[in-house]
Every structure is written in C-alpha cells, then in structure tokens.
Amino acid sequence: MLTILGFAMIATFLVLIMMKKMSPIAALVLIPALFCVFVGKGAKLGDYVLDGVTDLAPTAAMLMFAIVYFGVMIDVGLFDPIVRGILKFCKADPMRIVVGTAVLAAIVSLDGDGSTTFMITVSAMYPLYKRLKMSMVVMTGVAAMANGVMNTLPWGGPTARAATALKLDASDIFVPMIPALLVGLLFVFVLSYVLGVRERRRLGVLTLDDVLEGEKAEEKETETVLVGAGGSGDGKVDMRKGVAGGAGSGTDADEQDDDFQGLDPHRATLRPKLYWFNALLTVGLLTAMIMELLPIPVLFLLGAALVLTVNFPHIPDQKARIAAHAENVLNVSGMVFAAAVFTGVLQGTGMVDNMAKWMVDVIPASMGPHMALVTGILSLPLTYFMSNDGFYFGVLPVLAEAGAAHGVSPLEMARASLVGQPLHMSSPLVPAVYVLVGMAKVEFGDHTKFVVKWAALTCLVILGAGMLFGII
C-alpha cells in the first residue's frame, strides 16, 4: 500500500505542476501533507517537517546569499569588461560571434539564474546576429547549452535540489564533478566553433564597417518610408538597437565599441573604482569553495555581507540592492523549505523505502551495480519532460534507495542526476527558456528542433567523462 501511495503522491505532484494547476512551492507542501493523512500518520507531520527544515537550512542559506552575491556583482559591473571584451573579439565574424555567445552565457551563468543569463546574453549578442543575418536558433541553442552546464553550480538549483533530496552536502556532490563539467563546457565551446564555422561559410566574413554601412543604407530607406507616413525615423532605429544598444551610424572605432556595450554602461550601481576588489573577492571566494576551506553557505554569507558593505556603504543603497534580488531569493529559498515537507513525508512515512524495494525487484540484478549510469541516462528524458522539482524530489530519492541496495553511494547517484541539465534548460517546463526565445524572437519549436540533439550529446559527453574519471 505504501508503494502505491508513494507513486501516487509523486504522480499527483508531477501532473499538477506540469499542468500548472499549482505552483511548485504549494505542491511541495500541500500534496505530501494530504498523503501523510492518507497513510494514517498525520499526527507526525510536524515532526517530519521540522526534521526536514533542520536538514535543509544550510542549503537554503547558500542559495539565498549566493544569489545576492552574484546579483550585486552584476550590478556593480564586475562582468562588464568581460562582455565588452567578448563583443570586441567577435567583430563581424560569425564564428567568433557564436563562440563569444557560449563564453558570455557561461560567464554570466555564475549568478545561478537562467533568466538573468539569457537577458544579458541576448541583449549583448542579438544586434550582431541581426545585423549579420545569422541564425537566431544558433544563438539560443548555444546559450541554453552553456547555461545548462553551468546550471549545475551549487547555487544554480539542481545540485542544491539533489543535496536536499538525498540530505547530502552540496560541495561533496559538486566539487568532484568539476572535471566532468569542464569537459562538457569545453565540448559546448568546440560545438560553438563548429556551428560558427558553418555560419561563416553560409554568410562569409564582413568587417564591422561593412555591416554598419549596409545598415546605414537600410536606415535611410526606413526613414524615408516613415517620414512619408508622418512617422519618425529615430523611433525605428532605436527599436532595432534593443536593450544592448545597437550600432550607430558613425565608423569611428571608439563609437563602435560604445555601441556594442551589451550592458547599460551608465547604470547608477556601477562601482568602477572597486572593480579589482570585487574581482579578487570573487576569485578568492570560488577558490575557497573549491578547496573547501569553509562550508559553502558560510562563504557566501560572508561574501554577500562584505560586497554589500564595501560597494554600498549607505544603508538605503544596501536595502535597494537586496530588494532588487529579493524575488529570486524568495522563490529559491522558499522552494527549498517547501521541499522539507515533501522529502520529510516521503522518508518519514516509509514510502520511499517501499518504492525503492519495488524498483530493486523490477530492475534486472545485472543492472544493479550500474544504477549511477542508469540514473545518468534517465536524467536526460526525465529532466526534459518534468521539472527539476519533480525529478529531484520525486524520482531521485527512489533511484538512490534502489542504488544503495546494490552498493552504489548516494553521492554517485546525485552526481549522475546532474548529467541531464544541458538538455533540461531547453525544456518547455523551464520558464527561463521562454525569456530566451522571446527576446531572440525565435519560435520555441524551431529552438527545440535545433537544440535537442546537440544538448543530448553534451549530456552524454559529461556522463562519459564522469565515468572515465571515476566520478560517477
């Protein structure tokens, strides 16, 4: 009976969040509470939840302060020179532009938020793709794959969910996975080069002057039409420049560089005099994380407090920066604490143990010792057709219990579960992907047809590297 109720609870959770009948946070709380009553252990619900919250508090703290930290770093301009350097490197060469898209998306993904990554990447690169008449699905596909690999960062979501679901330390999952993830990221860069060469062969290589001269002719034509209709030519030109700032009509090199900023170079939160302090602080923080000098939540708590104090010494400014990132913080940390109810009920009632026993009986004995490999392969379709919440809180605990019965450690299972993220970031269940295709003016179906095969291949490369290095 517990086995049936366990699968019924997971199925109900998945269906409701995929059909968008409930938010993930509400579903994580209400559905397990209801099933806890069905099992006959409603009186113990409080104990299950409090145990779960105690276990998950460090993960929630890590996510909260990591989002604030990297959000403030974007605000103060830490990544601006990198964006400008990438755009200057790209010039008007399609190959360089595609590679630059992958590099930019990977760097900006450090903030752990897919929507922010796609907004900055598309804002910076869209004018170049449009002016050179490059394929927009190449831009969306490359950005999604790079972000998918980087999404495995402990504060990005999946690693925290895996740690939460299996009650593990996020650094124990992530740090050993770094070599395999670096191989996956390198593969994305190589793939970007190949796709860029294909675009170069299709379009040829132009100088920036050629592009701007061609655009000036188009602008004159547009202005003539608009003036004849009683409109303003300037309005049309500004629309085409977009968020990132489009190319101007001059040919002076400095003017061209200013035109291709990618990020607003005049925003009030910039702190150019503190650039090297912020850069060294970030490098030191990431180094300390990799070396495990302190727990990750403590590192980001200290880092967020320090970067806010130094960059925004006035209290109202600090409050404004915290408020600017409060929505992301609340959504992510709220999800973690809500998950305490789901995982607590699943574990406390014994449902997960009974489901794992059933899966052990179903999976051929010969496959038992290879449950990590099975999990890695299953993560591709499962994380594409269901949300990360559904996979990590509903499916992974069951697979982990089945793996444990055959001597496969929960850490190996958690690492294997991260393999499908490059494909997951193009799932129709990921809200950020709609930001990506919407800003790039790409049909979701076109994006899907282009990216699925390459993203799946990237996942398999990470899985292969993980097995080769003995991580999975």
Image (tube, rainbow, N blue to C red):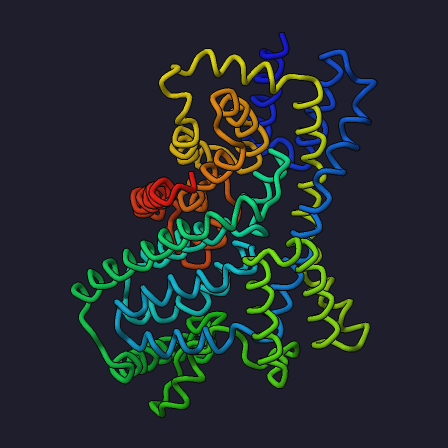
- Residue 122 shown left or right of residue 292 in the figure: left
* Image quarter (top left, top right, bottom left or bottom right) of the N terminus: top right
Q: Position of residue 318 (x, y in %)?
A: 76, 70
- Residue 422 shown left or right of residue 14 in the figure: left
Residue furthest out toward the bottom: 252
Q: Is residue 139 above or below residue 415?
A: below
What residue sits 70% from the left and 40% below the top?
56
Q: Is residue 203 above or below residue 388?
A: below
What residue sits 41% from the left and 46% below the top?
422
Does residue 328 appear in this view? no
Q: Position of residue 7 (x, y in %)?
A: 57, 17
Does residue 295 appear in this view? yes
Q: Hey, which quadrant is residue 65 in on the image? A: bottom right
Viewer-closest of 94 and 158: 158
Viewer-closest of 161 and 91: 161
Viewer-closest of 469 and 157: 469
Q: Position of residue 362 (x, y in %)?
A: 44, 12
- Residue 391 shown left or right of residue 188 in the figure: right
* Image quarter (top left, top right, bottom left or bottom right) of the C terminus: top left
Q: Position of residue 408 (x, y in %)?
A: 48, 28
- Residue 228 shown left or right of residue 347 in the figure: left
Instruction: Count up the numbered dots.
Output: 0
Q: Is residue 251 above or below residue 160?
A: below
Viewer-closest of 432 and 213: 432
